[in-house]
Image (cartoon, helix red, strand yellow):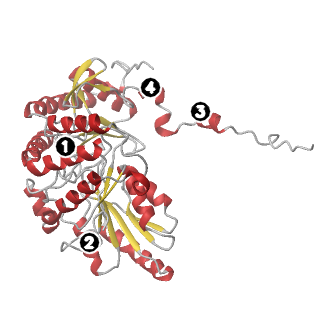
Amino acid sequence: MPMVLGGLKRLELIRTKPELKERLWTVVAALQKGLREAGFDLGKTNSAVTPVYMKGGEAEATNLVYDLRENFGIFCSMIVYPVIPKGDILLRLIPTAMHTLEDVEITVDAFKKVRKTLLEGKYSTTDFAIVEVDM
Amino acid sequence: MHRNNHKKNYNVDIFEKFRANKGEIGKHMKKIHGYFAFPKLEGELAPRMIFRGKEVLNWSLNNYLGLANHTEVRKADAEAAAQYGMAYPMGARMMSGQTSKHEQLERELAAFVGKPDAFLLNYGYQGMVSVIDAICGRNDVVVYDAEAHACILDGVRLHMGKRFVYLHNDIDSLRKQLTHATRLAEKQKGGILVITEGVFGMAGDMGKLDEIAALKDEFKFRLLVDDAHGFGMMGKQVPVLLNILGLLIKSIFTLPLLQKQWPELVVLLPAKQIFAFTYDIICVHKPMLNRCQCQWFWVV
């Protein structure tokens, strides 16, 4: 029953608060524009889903995401083979109405920096802090 | 008593076999578990959450409109849980689980999307599987997009009849597969169901719904659209999209639609063609806060 009553409330908010969608699209537009202007490949998205395509193997992908999370404090999903072809890295960002334009700026900046490290080949070497995960 | 020793020449243990080969992602389990896979995000659902003790800027929640942790939503959820608990009503709706609130929500949802009726179900993933299974029989033919979500693939896998896959968003390929499908369906006296998505969740591109619907001039089929990632977030605030898709977007997505934050939502829109370009069925769902949520399932 909470799901049904909660559903009624959500429907009410969707009906009565168009500003939520407006805020979402402000963030989407800023994020996608920022990334595209920085030269990132966002593929063929024409929705809020924001994929960022880069090239690299497993080591590059894991080290890049590790760097993003640990040193830049950016958390996003990483998709690798077999969901996408080998040699491709896909980072997927989902903007929301709750994000701010400052969040966008921080993120675009972080992406530029990790791309630089990626292109320098640093994520493919053991020089980089290879992920050690507690099991 | 004589017993054959069937183990003599055959001794494969399914657990051992699985341990030896966990698949493309599973083989990295030790390295990725808890970090790349099954990460724990703690704190309130928000752009800033805690990952391994540190605050991170989080871009991984499908909380498009921010309803998941909206104060009014949290209040409504909590009050309902306090009043009814999580177990009420009990049993399948057909047997003992029907309530007037379910009916009210179905009515409101149907009115909201301009359809005659709606029906709620439990999960998005299961919903797509169920929809395909429920409406397709052995003689019906399914034609689906190559990049369709796993829930569609699983639904298609359950389908006992024939299926054809077309290249992602490729209308020529779809036309070719529809030609095959039509030939077969005619022979079997079955129908044809085409399945695609409104917004593909991985790449963010939209299914070419208008072009697919236009194929109805040439072929007889019904269209099922899974719009888990598009519903409610697309709309008139996106003039570029409006230009691209014209009438379709105007007629479908500018409705103040339901959306991704909605708990597990499956929408089945009717067979009646209300819009100029129309889909017959649209499916919206969302793995949300709880795994025990209702699913909304519109059927007309």
Instruction: State which tag comes first along the sequence, 3 or 4.
Output: 3
What is the x, y in percent for residue A78? 32, 36
* Residue type at numbered disc 2: Ala
Nearest to the observer: residue B258 or residue A120: B258
Q: Which label sits on residue B64?
A: 1
Q: How far, Cα to Cα, is label 1 from label 3?
A: 38 Å
What is the x, y in percent for residue A44? 22, 52
Residues under numbered marks 1 and 4 in contact, where contact means CB atoms less than 8 Å apart: no
Instruction: State which tag comes first along the sequence, 2 or 4.
Output: 4
Residues under numbered marks 2 and 4 in contact, where contact means CB atoms less than 8 Å apart: no
Select label 2 or label 4 by which is in front.
Answer: 2
* Residue type at numbered disc 4: Lys
* Residue type at numbered disc 1: Tyr
* Residue type at numbered disc 3: Arg
Residue picked out by circle 4? B31
Residues under numbered marks 1 and 3 in contact, where contact means CB atoms less than 8 Å apart: no
* Residue A70 lies in quadrant: top left
Say yes or no: labels 1 and 3 on the same chain: yes
| Chain letter for the residue marked with disc 2 in the picture | B
Residue shown at 18% from the left, 74% from the top: B276
* Residue A96 placement, left or right of B138: left
Residue picked out by circle 3? B19
Q: How far, Cα to Cα, is label 2 from label 1?
A: 27 Å
Instruction: State which tag comes first along the sequence, 1 or 4.
Output: 4
Q: How far, Cα to Cα, is label 1 from label 4?
A: 31 Å
What is the x, y in percent for residue B252? 18, 63
In the depicted structure, whether residue B219 falls above or below residue A13: below
Q: Which label sits on residue B213?
A: 2
Q: Quadrant of the C terminus of chain B?
A: bottom left
Nearest to the observer: residue A54 or residue B143: B143
